[in-house]
């Protein structure tokens, strides 16, 4: 028995945990629900707590180095203070609300490469390797976010890439933010790319527009930023396209560069 207890501390014969989602698709501001299933291992173990949270893969830059790390947000405790019985099964329901600024992982049914969000579950057992589980969640855009992406496409901006970066921008609620990168239309000769960040809340979304200006022979390129406020009801693509076009052109006019 002593050997079994020792092995369980290192994970062999320990209790297992599995998270079963009711649905693996959600939107920012929505909820993801399911149940945590804990099955006792070969020995009884005292569980301090069972914690469920959301996890995002983020890019971190420091000096000349760049790497990725997993950041957990929106944690909640679903169970605590019980002892597992060998072979016995226990189920604990849970419901997590996705923050409004949760990164979008798919647009138009296409997964955004490099963007990952999931539900992570930790079974905390004193003195033992914590068994855990990770289940991917597809975060679909809000209707207004989808309208912005489609409107940019109608204006000739071509989607290039998406990433989630560690850090904050003005108005962000999470310790990271998402950028969607777009290549310019042929008419935008002075712009390398347009980066779009959505800062959503219950009333609508701030669309942060960052344009990377091309440098000339005697001038350096630089980034310039503007914001456009939209409500959740702003889903008409033509109207959104007009607002975006004006915002980007005004951004250029303020900085002394045009198309």
Image: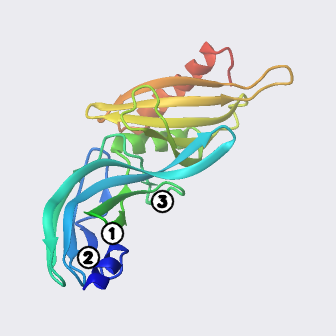
- Tell me: 79 left or right of 144: left
User: On the image, numbered disc 3 is attached to which residue?
Assistant: 111
Is residue 127 depicted above or below 184 in this figure?
below
| Residue 239 drawn at (x, y percent) | 42, 32
Residue 157 visible in the picture? no
Disc 1: CA contacts within 10 A as few (<14), some (14-19) or many (>=20): some
Disc 2: CA contacts within 10 A as few (<14), some (14-19) or many (>=20): many
Mark number, residue 131? 1
Is residue 62 depicted above or below 17 in this figure?
above
User: On the image, numbered disc 2 is attached to which residue?
Assistant: 15
Q: Give the quarter of the figure containing the N terminus.
A: bottom left
- Tell me: 237 left or right of 50: right
> Mark 3 or 1 closer to N-term?
3
Residue 147 visible in the picture? yes
Dot 2 lies on which element? loop
| Residue 217 drawn at (x, y percent) | 86, 24
Is residue 4 depicted above or below 30 in this figure?
below
> Mark 1 or 2 closer to N-term?
2
Do the residues bearing badges 1 and 2 touch, measured as CB atoms within 8 Å?
yes
Is residue 258 depicted above or below 132 in this figure?
above
At 20% across and 65% down in the image, what residue appears?
Answer: 47
Q: Which is closer to the viewer, label 3 or label 2?
A: 2
Q: How is the image coloured?
A: rainbow
- Tell me: 152 left or right of 205: right
Gap between marks 3 and 2, in whole Å? 33 Å
């Amino acid at each position: 028995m002593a050997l079994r207890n020792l092995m369980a501390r290192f994970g062999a014969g320990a209790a297992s945990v599995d998270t079963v989602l009711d649905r693996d698709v959600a939107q920012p501001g929505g909820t993801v629900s399911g149940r945590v299933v804990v099955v006792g291992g070969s020995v009884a173990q005292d569980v301090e707590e069972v914690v469920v949270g959301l996890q995002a893969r983020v890019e971190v830059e420091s000096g000349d180095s760049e790497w990725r790390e997993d950041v957990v947000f929106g944690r909640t405790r679903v169970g605590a203070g019980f002892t597992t019985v060998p072979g016995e099964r226990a189920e604990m329901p849970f419901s997590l609300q996705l923050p409004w600024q949760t990164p979008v992982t798919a647009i138009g049914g296409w997964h955004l490469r490099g963007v990952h969000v999931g539900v992570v579950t930790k079974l905390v057992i004193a003195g033992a390797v914590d068994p855990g589980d990770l289940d991917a969640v597809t975060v679909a855009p809000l209707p207004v976010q989808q309208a912005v992406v489609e409107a940019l496409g109608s204006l000739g901006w071509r989607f290039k890439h998406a990433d989630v970066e560690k850090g904050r921008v003005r108005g962000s609620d999470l310790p990271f933010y998402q950028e969607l990168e777009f290549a310019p239309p042929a008419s935008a000769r002075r712009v390398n790319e347009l980066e779009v960040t959505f800062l959503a809340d219950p009333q609508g979304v701030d669309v942060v527009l960052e344009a990377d200006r091309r440098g000339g022979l005697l001038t350096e390129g630089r980034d310039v930023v503007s914001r456009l406020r939209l409500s959740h009801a702003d889903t008409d693509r033509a109207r959104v396209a007009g607002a975006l076009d004006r915002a980007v052109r005004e951004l250029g006019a303020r900085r002394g560069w045009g198309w």
